[in-house]
């Protein structure tokens, strides 16, 4: 998929939001977190939840990368 979430994990590290805290506080589910790790599709609701949690915009956590 041409959407990559690498920026998300960099921002999480910068803001000290761990995957443990995401799971513990039920911010998003484990399956959704795994989808993000694998650059698989997620809902816009998930993007909105992450943006609210990280105080950012969608472009801060994902990017379009054209397939070669």
Image: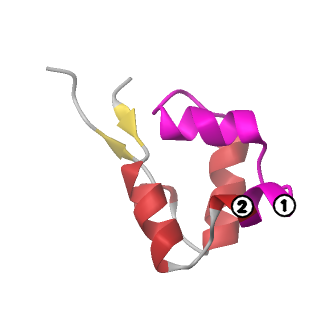
Q: Please, what secondary structure does the residue beneath circle 2 have?
A: helix
Q: Please, what secondary structure does the residue beneath circle 1 have?
A: helix
- Are the residues at dot 1 and dot 2 in contact (C-beta closer than 8 Å)? yes
What residue sits 85% from the left and 63% below the top?
25
What residue sits 62% from the left and 63% below the top?
51
Q: Residues within 10 Å of mark 2 (few under 14, many from 20)?
A: few
Q: Is residue 25 magenta?
A: yes
Percent position (x, y) of residue 58? 50, 56
Q: Is residue 30 magenta?
A: yes
In the rendered view, tell whether residue 50 sits above or below residue 17.
Answer: above
Mark 1 and mark 2: span between their CA atoms? 6 Å
Q: Which residues are magenta?
A: 21-43
> Which residue bears the numbered disc 2?
20
What residue sits 61% from the left and 36% below the top?
34
In the rendered view, tell whether residue 54 sits above or below residue 38.
Answer: below
* Disc assigned to residue 24: 1
Q: In the figure, residue 42 lies in which quadrant?
A: top right
Quarter of the C terminus within the rendering = top left
């Amino acid at each position: 998929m041409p959407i990559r979430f690498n920026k998300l994990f960099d921002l999480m590290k910068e803001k000290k939001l761990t995957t443990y805290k995401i799971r513990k506080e039920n911010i998003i589910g484990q399956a959704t977190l795994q989808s993000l790790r694998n650059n698989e599709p997620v809902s816009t609701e998930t993007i909105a939840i992450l943006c609210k949690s990280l105080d950012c915009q969608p472009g801060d956590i994902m990017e379009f990368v054209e397939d070669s």
